[in-house]
Image (cartoon, rainbow, N blue to C red):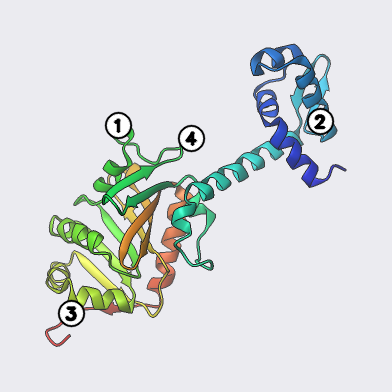
Amino acid sequence: MVAEAGVLEVLLQRGALLRRLAREPCQPSELVADLDSSRSTVDRGLSELQDSNLVERVESRYRTTLVGELALAEFDRLSGRLRSAVDASDLLALLPNDAPLDWRMLDGAAAVRVDRRTAVTEFERPPDRPVDRGPNGDPFRLFQSALEADRRHRAIVPTVPPRLARAYREAIRGGLEVEAVVSDEAAATLCSDFREATADALDAHRLSLWEAPTTLPYGLIVVDDPNADSARLAMLVICREDELRGLLVNDSGDALAWARRQLERYLANAQPLSFSDGD
């Protein structure tokens, strides 16, 4: 039996060779030409892959085994997760070490960073699966479109960054509907710094607020559009000292399902919040 560490090492060293064989069986000479490698390198790689039971020889050709197919799929999945974590490491470092965050939210997410020196928002997205499907592939257009009037936002709000609060104030006035589970701190900020706008939104039934005893250490937004599945998003909002520092944006079904479960869990322990003259 081949040790797991040994298989992982072979996958790291011979991944390109295994991926080529996963497409179709090949002779060594074809692999030399396709991979632009020497014959000795190809022969050595094939030998290592065979020893790990990842490929087999059938007559003059080599092909992947079932183990090889499964191992390659898992290796690629792990590699993608590691890339996602590394790409967003500066934003994730702003969260507590015990922050409840699932890989389903992180896999394939686009990282959105705010440059504090210039107040310019910088966007990066994975090259293999861009989140934005709009014109020019610009994630900022995607984020802006999330505030359109025909959308509905459900959110967990631990703090209220002024920049986001002002954007939502205008979007709600334009017809956006928002349901938010807020912390005690966020409720106090809305009551003091944005009292008039919050009261108007509540009166117009475009905003529903629920106060929860505890919330996540980051903001979480689910964007739904009844007219377009492609416009549905999950957004993780990362702040430090009430200042927006970045977002992780994901449109995968797994990310949306996970985000919706978090919203339902916190909403179940929250109480309706309303403003009155005496508040």
40 up-or-down from 146: above or below: above
Which residue has dot 2 on it?
A: 48
Q: Position of residue 52 (x, y in %)?
A: 82, 35
Any part of residue 205 in sight: yes
The amino acid type found where label 1 is placed reads Asn
Quarter location, residue 169 = bottom left
Which residue has dot 4 on it?
A: 128
The amino acid type found where label 4 is placed reads Asp
Q: Position of residue 256 (x, y in %)?
A: 42, 53
10 up-or-down from 47: above or below: below
Q: Earlier in the sequence, mark 3 or mark 1?
A: 1
Give the label, 2 or 3, closer to the camera.
2
Which residue is painted at 62% across and 39% down in the image? 76
Q: Secondary structure at mark 3?
A: loop
Q: Earlier in the sequence, mark 4 or mark 1?
A: 4
Q: Earlier in the sequence, mark 2 or mark 1?
A: 2
- Image side of residue 68 versus residue 159, left or right: right
Quarter location, residue 60 = top right
The amino acid type found where label 3 is placed reads Phe
The amino acid type found where label 2 is placed reads Glu
Which residue has dot 1 on it?
A: 136
- Image side of residue 11 versus residue 91, left or right: right
Any part of residue 229 in sight: no
Which residue has dot 3 on it?
A: 275
Q: Earlier in the sequence, mark 2 or mark 3?
A: 2
Quadrant of the frame with the C terminus: bottom left
Q: Residue furthest bottom?
A: 278
How far separated are the C-alphas under marks 3 and 1? 43 Å
